[in-house]
Image (cartoon, rainbow, N blue to C red):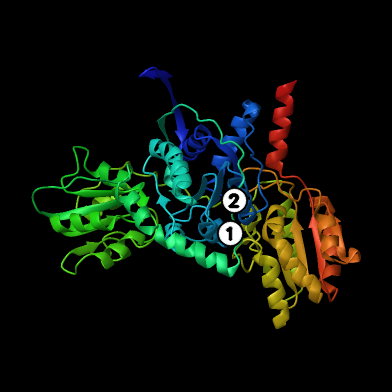
């Protein structure tokens, strides 16, 4: 659908929040996206990849990276060259990217740089409810948080301009509910990519202590301007009222929608909508002058609520997640906000009583199933055996029918935790890690184990893809034996098996032999993910 406004054509598209972000970046003159797949951020990069297949002349770099740290560093390199870059990850991925992210606020940027992080309140597919806004505050840079798909699209152009104006990266935070819901978005005219113009003549990017101190002082000097831009932001809104109210509200990002849904005829009290940070302190004080109490409504941790409590005088009551009116954990929704406001929730249809919960499970025919079956067969003979798992679809081996894992903490932790347990005397200590996770964060742990010839058995369960997030390319495909040999694994204790039921005798024999070897061994069960295999077969059939 095309609409004409003032001689300019605008197109409307139905987009996911992630897709709106991606389209916004493209239309803002994007030159490269760098990312590691992680729900709920994955669709941003996939959308750009799809766009580039249809429009290869646009020359937007769009390959997946090995992990979030390499993605952040590559995006910073593109910014150094004067181009606009986007780096995408989920919230726990920010922990991996934290070193270059925080230091990028010290180097500053050349071409615009947006760090897009998708948080996951309620932990739909994550280990925690970490709130990325704290990282933005920690790094002393602007943070944007869209409240709608249209705002997500519009923010991208604004954020790139803001980044290049301040010469700082801009952090943009979204949440699962916005990332994975659809709305109609009005697109605007596409901007050309920046010309190549690498940094030259200055040494601001060489973070020797003397230079870093000067750059940090410069960052601090920009804080008043960053605050002013937040107060004046088109994405923050507040309308002062002439009379006093018993209550006002601060609604952040997507939570503003929940508040609006509670009052279809208009919110009957003053509201400060925040979608750009740092929080506009003076506006908060103005709101407090008009209200006896303020409810802070935000998805995630009480990031704003804690700060507002420190800004306002004690006679203004602050309520929200910390005081119990809103739940301390999980994502919000209109019914939760209605209950906090003392309103009657909307009626919901009764859920069918005969519906049985169906927990996730490994696909029938998945190679990981044969791996876990073999582990359980062999380890039943070792009463003290411990299996350290990792992040991926194979984490489902912790659930019935296998119940094979004793821990799953973070990307790459299987190898290092198995090593630490073996150092403490645990035997046997077995680590299981997927192919994409191994190249993401497992290789350095393997080097530690090689250097001490730790008596652990590492299983790299290779399904030739990044299965958990939909089948993206895996950085180490067809390279794992070479990587392991290069790191120093003894070739006599580097084994490859095919995880099929008919090969169970070979797999269990190999696993027993390597467990009994008092040193480091690596077993690579390799069979393609049945989901990606099915998609390939379907695509091949469609070409006939």
**Front one among 203 and 163:** 203
Q: Farthest residue toward the front? A: 201
Q: Secondary structure at mark 2?
A: helix
Spot occupied by residue 384 in the image (x, y as percentages of width and height): 70, 77
Spot occupied by residue 280 in the image (x, y as percentages of width and height): 29, 55
Q: What number is the disc on residue 76?
A: 2
**Front one among 43 and 503:** 43
Q: State which quadrant residue 178 falls in.
A: top left
Location of mark 1 (residue):
100
Q: Please identify the quadrant where the N terminus is shown.
A: top left
- Whether residue 469 is visible to the viewer of this picture, yes or no, is no
Q: Secondary structure at mark 1?
A: helix
Q: Farthest residue toward the right? A: 492
Q: Is 422 left, or right, of 509 in this rendering?
A: left
Spot occupied by residue 141 in the image (x, y as percentages of width and height): 44, 56
> Do residues under tags 2 and 1 come within 8 Å of each other at their CB atoms?
yes
**Front one among 222 and 399:** 222
529 to 248, vertically: above or below: above
């Amino acid at each position: 659908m095309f609409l004409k406004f003032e001689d300019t054509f605008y197109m409307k598209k139905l987009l996911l929040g992630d897709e709106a972000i991606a389209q916004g970046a493209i239309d803002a003159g994007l030159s490269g996206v760098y990312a590691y797949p992680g729900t709920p951020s994955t669709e941003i990069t996939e959308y750009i990849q799809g766009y580039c297949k249809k429009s290869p002349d646009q020359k937007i770099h769009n390959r997946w990276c090995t992990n979030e740290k390499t993605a952040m560093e590559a995006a910073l390199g593109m910014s150094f060259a004067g181009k606009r870059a986007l780096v995408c990850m989920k919230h726990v991925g920010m922990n991996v990217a934290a070193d270059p992210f925080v230091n990028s606020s010290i180097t500053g940027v050349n071409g615009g740089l947006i760090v897009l992080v998708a948080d996951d309140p309620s932990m739909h597919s994550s280990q925690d409810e970490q709130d990325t806004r704290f990282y933005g505050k920690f790094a002393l840079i602007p943070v944007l948080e869209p409240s709608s798909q249209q705002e997500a699209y519009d923010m991208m152009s604004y954020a790139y301009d803001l980044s290049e104006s301040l010469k700082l990266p801009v952090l943009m935070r979204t949440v699962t509910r916005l990332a994975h819901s659809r709305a109609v978005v009005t697109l605007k005219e596409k901007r050309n990519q920046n010309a190549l113009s690498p940094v030259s003549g200055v040494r601001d990017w060489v973070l020797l202590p003397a230079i870093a101190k000067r750059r940090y002082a410069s960052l601090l000097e920009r804080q008043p301007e960053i605050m002013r831009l937040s107060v004046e932001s088109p994405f923050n809104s507040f309308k002062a009222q002439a009379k006093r109210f018993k209550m006002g509200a601060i609604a952040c990002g997507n939570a503003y929608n929940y508040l609006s849904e509670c009052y279809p005829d208009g919110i009957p009290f003053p509201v400060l909508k925040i979608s750009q940070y740092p929080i506009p302190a003076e506006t908060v004080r103005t709101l407090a002058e008009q209200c006896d109490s303020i409810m802070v409504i935000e998805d995630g941790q009480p990031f704003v609520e804690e700060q507002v409590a420190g800004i306002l005088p004690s006679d203004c009551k602050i309520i929200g997640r910390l005081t119990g009116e809103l739940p301390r954990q999980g994502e919000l929704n209109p019914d939760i906000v209605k209950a906090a406001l003392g309103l009657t929730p909307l009626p919901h249809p009764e859920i069918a009583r005969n519906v049985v919960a169906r927990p996730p499970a490994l696909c029938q025919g998945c190679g990981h199933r044969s791996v876990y079956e073999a582990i359980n067969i062999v380890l039943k003979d070792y009463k003290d055996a411990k299996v350290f798992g990792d992040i991926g679809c194979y984490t489902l081996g912790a659930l019935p029918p296998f119940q094979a894992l004793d821990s799953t903490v973070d990307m790459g932790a299987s190898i290092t935790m198995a090593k630490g347990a073996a150092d403490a005397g645990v035997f046997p200590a077995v680590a299981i890690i997927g192919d994409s996770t191994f190249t993401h964060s497992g290789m350095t742990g393997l080097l530690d184990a090689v250097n001490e010839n730790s008596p652990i058995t590492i299983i790299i369960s290779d399904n030739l893809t990044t299965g958990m997030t939909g089948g993206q390319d895996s950085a180490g495909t067809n390279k794992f034996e070479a990587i392991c040999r290069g790191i120093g694994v003894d070739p006599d204790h580097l084994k490859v098996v095919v995880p099929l039921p008919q090969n169970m005798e070979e797999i269990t024999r190999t696993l027993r032999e390597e467990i009994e070897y008092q040193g480091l061994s690596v077993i690579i069960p390799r069979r393609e993910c049945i989901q990606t295999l099915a998609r390939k077969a379907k695509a091949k059939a469609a070409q006939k």
